[in-house]
Amino acid sequence: MAMTKLRNIWRNIQDLNWTQDLEVTKTGAEAAKAVLDFAKAIKEQKPNVQNFKPYLEQISSLLDVFNSPLGQITKEVIPFAPIAITILKFIVDATHKEPSLENCVLLVSQAAYIDSFQDILKHDSELLKKINQNLPASHALALQIQKLGEQEFDQREVKKAILYFHESQLAESFNQILQQRLQEAGLTEAEAKTLTERVARHTDDNMQDALVEVGEKADKLWKWYSAGGKEKLEKNLDIEDYLEQVIKPKPEEKIFDETHITFRDLYVPLQVKELDAKDDANLELEAWVKAILNDADGKQKQVLFIQGEAGRGKSVFCRMFADWVQRKLHPSFTPILIRLRDLRVLKDNLTDTLENYLQHLDFVTSDSGWLTDKNTRFLFLLDGFDELLLEGRASGGLKEFLEQVEQFQKDRLCQHQFLVTGRPLALQGNERFLSQTKSLKRVELQPMDDSIQQTWLEKWAVAAQVNKSEFEKFLQACPDEVKDNLAREPLLLYLLARMHRDNRLNVEMFAGADSIKAKIRIYDEAVKWVLEKQRDSENQNDNSRLTGLESEDLRQFLTEAALCVVQSGNESARVTMLEARLKDSNNPAAKLIQDARQENASEKNQQDKLLNNLLTAFYIKPASGDKGGSVEFVHKSFCEFLFAERLLESFVDWTTKVSKRQREDDLITTVTMDRQIYDLLGYGNLTPEIVEYLMGLLAESSEFQEVEHLCQLFQRLEHFYFRWCDGEFIDAEDVNLPQIKKKQLREQLPERENHLGLRQVDVYTGLNVMIVLLELHRYAQTKDDLKEKINFHPCGEPDSDEFDSQRLRCIIGYSHCLDILAFNNNLRLFLRCADLRDTDLGDLLLSDADLNNANLTNADLRDTYLSGADLSSANLSSADLSDANLNSADLTSANLSSANLSGVNLGGAHLSSADLSNADLSDANLSEASLDDTNLRGC
């Protein structure tokens, strides 16, 4: 940033032959006299540049006047503002150019500061009596005052002085001189400091008047003031403060709990692939975005849509690129970084939505036209659309929010650019909207290739001070799933590298592990390692309380924290909520939080420090901007994994038997289990990521290696499910479990604007139990010893007394209290391999549903909307699909033998290798359908 010296102003008067290159050779007293004589001369005669040259040659800055006895300054009462005006006039006459805003401010601030000093002492006779008015400045202070003329100030600080002089670097430098001068003149340190602060604040008022007066002599400054320059400057400085305080530090923040490794140390540019392009070549992400920004003046403006799996580097890219923009492009583009997990309210339009969220930023609240000002162009980086959880919207509000962004972006008057990131799973159900929206430019992050991975490894070796080749040998010895897949994801590669550095991993850990099992083993080992690290810490001042806790207690602490964060909306959780849950479980860690709060109630920093240790800083940290004692997980994946582990803990409890009077009873009674199910699952929908971790943990769990335990879990959950379908819990009069959970959420999450009602809690609980049952069914069908013992049919086993072909229709209708698409949005990804024989699904909307390998034999699917559904390898034999919409559905290898397909819309459907033998295709629409190797015998 450009720097300016106080004395550089003199150098603008080029037609004067300065002696000794303006080096001041006079004493402090002589310099002070020169300033006073200069002021008197201006007052008494017409300014002439040659006449005043002798004065200017002796002055390093106007503050040289403080070398003189202070009585001379107050006695003469000579206004100093005219000095600034005169020097500026010299500059204009000598250079034939308008003085810069910075030069104007530097001059005026000195004069206004001295005038403020005079004003205050003139009206405070008592204070004036305490000052030795005849004592000149000491030689040491005179040298400091002289050096002040050589001090450099960056232009931003000089401009800041116009608005808030008392907060600027100029004020800080001037105050140091004046305070020391007042102490030499007899004031105490406290008195000198108080007077100095008064002078600085009074200068704020004098600055405004002096600048206006100067403006009459400097046309550019006058026009700047007249056109509202002060207000524009205030807005620009607010933006600069945001960039300096929020965006600039992002790359330098430490990764997790590393002591010195930052995001910048390990960041590598990643590659993407355009989803709608014919060419599937990889592109460098940064170069792709930069090219679009460089062409931002073109006619076609598009929302940049970056999707990528968990841990692939989306959020790190946002923080790094935002910093690059503020360094290289601002003010052509000004970055605004928004975590979408924090965006909770959707207003009527994007302007109102953004203003509601950004109300903590002064440049937003002080200017109603902040988005329409053609002199300001923002790059909005909206990170994490998968974490969007808008109040009052069961589906999260992603589609509605993207519609607002899209409408705003394509407005011909919009000069701003939007970039959105998130996980692709969140887009399920919105694919049609995305494909039809031409103003979205979509790319998907790709795993690291060899070159990028090598760059990362080199950076890791430098930052972590480790031997790169040793870690590479470890990776090469790992199974293919680890070295070829997981080690190409930035987050997992970091975890592998870190734990290898600390000797926590070995190749044998990954033997026989598929992708999810390998992830689980990495996360599981990471949790064990961090908990041991916490307990064994040598820093007794910070961690002594933890050493008395068992690792099991700390692990339970983490899993319960994960549950709280998930139930709070995958954002953050109040510590009071965590305390309440742990108190019920008698976990000793709960008492530590309570003690920490009481002991450090007045020392928030100390409280946060202990909280960091208690909650394991590797995973959890105090919530950003938190003022009420909340915590959030550093990465969403940790939260999902640990919440899945918390669910598994309950599964184990529900299948544990205890001996009682020569018989075995359930450790957890049915009444207690019912209550726990509502407590665990009555908050919202289980996400695919959580379910994937849960089923992976279940498959790895030693408790569920025994067939009877898994069968018991299934039977108990199925028993709950059928009672839920019958309305047993929501209709209960004595102990109403949905009511209890509803009340708990309201008490523990008071900040929520839209709380779940009784029916919403009940629906979410039942749908989540249904998801678990569907997953247990799918898992059992892959095991020979389970496939005959675990069979889940949402309508009950066909040909049994429990069977009701309408049951699933009733559940879907009941879920409409959340949203008309709630069932489809929450369950569509869990219907693969489902047993839906003889089910009545007529007229239902199941677009984009995953029905891969589902058994739909004899199902009634008349008029069903299955556009885009995955029905590959599904058994639809004898199903009634008349008039159903299967447009673009995938029916590859599906069995449709003897199915009624009369009037069905199969336009664009994939029917390769499907069995359509004896199917009724009368009036069916097969336009553009793929029929390669399709069996059409008897059609």
Image (cartoon, grey):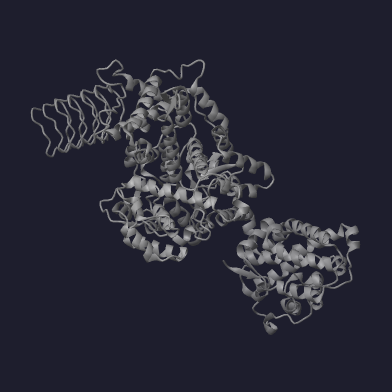
Tell me where residue 923 sits by quadrant. top left
Quarter of the image with the C terminus is top left
Outermost residue, left side: 938
Tell me where residue 820 sits by quadrant. top left
Residue 924 is situated, as x and y percent measured from the top left of the image, at 17, 28
Q: Residue at point 77% right, 81% down?
A: 26
In-image side of 658 versus 539 (left or right): left
Tell me where residue 629 sits by quadrant. top right
In-image side of 622 versus 333 (left or right): right
Residue 16 is situated, as x and y percent measured from the top left of the image, at 68, 80
Residue 773 is situated, as x and y percent measured from the top left of the image, at 34, 29
Up the image or down, 280 lies above or below 913; here it is below
Q: Residue at point 26% right, 54% down?
A: 279
Residues 730 and 109: in front is 730
Residue 203 is situated, as x and y percent measured from the top left of the image, at 75, 59
The reply to whether residue 381 is visible in this rendering is no
Up the image or down, 90 lies above or below 772; here it is below
Residues 118 and 305: in front is 305
